[in-house]
Amino acid sequence: MNYDDVVLGRRSIRGYKPDPVPKDLIKEVLTLAMRSPSSMNTQPWNFTVVSGEVLNRIRAGNTERNLAGVPHSREFRIGSAFEGVHRDRQVGVAKQLFGAMGIARDDKEGRTDWVLRGFRQFDAPVCVIITYDRVLADSDDTPFDCGAVGGAGTRADS
């Protein structure tokens, strides 16, 4: 397989079948992902695999907090809102996405439902939560490394 095929074949998946994912497949994907490069070979990631009722409770809690307006709690910096060309690109993609889905600009319920899908992990049957030890909280490398291992676990044919 060529690198071009991998890059051009990558997609963002926003909907999943409800079929259970075999544990052996999850183990295979995580084993391969752990071969991702990390800063100074620290491999700081920890994986928690969640499915079933536990995942449903997480989804319900995420939805409730979002609808109640509870501020997001992040343990890492998320920065300020995008501006300029980056904001223009963000808005342009949102317009394309909502247009393709038939969600009108004034359809607040439809737009809210779409946002909440993200907080429900797009209804995927399994969720892999990637964390790192609190002692690494001041490292700028660690979140980057965890993002890299997460991207490595994404299959182009999901």
Image (spheres, rainbow, N blue to C red):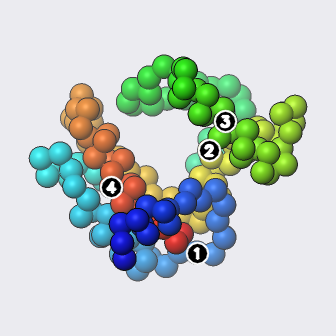
Q: Which mark is residue 92?
A: 3
Of marks 1 and 4, the one in the foreground: 4
User: Disc 2 marks which residue?
Assistant: 119
Residue 124 drawn above or below residue 146: below
Q: Secondary structure at mark 4?
A: helix
Q: CA distance from mark 4 to mark 2?
A: 21 Å
User: Disc 1 marks which residue?
Assistant: 20
87 on left or right of 151: right
10 Å crowding of disc 4: few (<14), some (14-19), many (20+): many
| Rendering coords of residue 26 (x, y %) | 42, 72
Q: Who is closer to the viewer here, 1 or 97?
A: 1
| Rendering coords of residue 132 (x, y %) | 29, 44
Residue 73 drawn above or below residue 60: above
- The type of residue carrying mark 2 is Phe
What residue is drawn where x is 22% and y is 32%? 139
What residue is drawn where x is 33% and y is 55%? 149
Q: CA distance from mark 3 to mark 4?
A: 29 Å
User: Disc 4 marks which residue?
Assistant: 149
20 on left or right of 107: left
10 Å crowding of disc 1: few (<14), some (14-19), many (20+): few
- The type of residue carrying mark 3 is Gly
Q: Earlier in the sequence, mark 1 or mark 2?
A: 1
Q: Secondary structure at mark 3?
A: helix
Q: Secondary structure at mark 2?
A: helix
Q: Who is closer to the viewer here, 116 or 154?
A: 154
- The type of residue carrying mark 1 is Pro
- The type of residue carrying mark 4 is Val
Q: CA distance from mark 1 to mark 2?
A: 20 Å
